[in-house]
Image: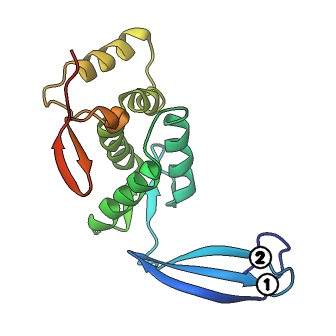
Amino acid sequence: MFCPFCNDNDSKVIDSRDSGDTIRRRRECLMCGLRFTTYEKVQTRALLVIKRDGRREDFNREKLWASLRSACAKRPLPIGSIEKVIVEIETALANTGRAEIGSRLIGEFVMDKLKGLDRVAYMRFASVYRDFRDIESFKEEAEALLDPEDPVEESSQLSFLEDEVPINGKRRKAKKRA
């Protein structure tokens, strides 16, 4: 394991913890003495993505993270929500049981998750993913989002305005202001 500070490859593990589907290890570099954290995950099998033009490439979690990060930029989202979406998408892809997945299916998974998370981020991603040719197709997508056939549960952007407020582990009704 290379130290992210000095690039030395000699470190010792100070602490290990199981955190769901990964193992979190706290390490200390034996050269510079600085500490860093690593996450280890079991790689089940390599997943290939079939691009629109027919090319195949390895699934790249970093590309998915970068596209979600840019779609959700400057949005008031809960901490860790992008990481949670990525884990849910990876789980859904693994559950398909296929070694090759079309990029179109991955895009649909992302759009489905973003629709429930943040509608502005959804529209940002959709505008790139669906490659709208004109303002009319963009308008149609926005109108479909505003008047859905299946009502979308409101995101937690304003979670502090919920009807119920937890106090000392118990939930009670919040007072409504006129």
Amino acid type indicated by mark 2: Cys
Name the one closer to the observer, 80 or 104.
80
Q: Which residue is rendered at x = 41% and y = 78% of the image?
A: 44
Q: Which residue is rendered at x = 86% and y = 79% of the image?
A: 32
- The reply, left or right, for residue 165 in relation to residue 131 is left
- The reply, left or right, for residue 93 in relation to residue 77 is left
Image mark for residue 3 = 2
Does residue 125 lie above or below 67 as drawn? above
* Element carrying mark 1: loop
Residue 155: name its quadrant. top left
Work out which quarter of the rendered image holds the C terminus and state it. Answer: top left
Q: Does residue 19 appear in the picture of this structure?
A: yes
Question: Is the Cβ of the residue at disc 1 closer than 8 Å to that at disc 2?
Answer: yes
Image mark for residue 9 = 1
* Element carrying mark 2: loop
Q: Which residue is rendered at x = 33% and y = 67% of the image?
A: 94
The chosen color scheme is rainbow
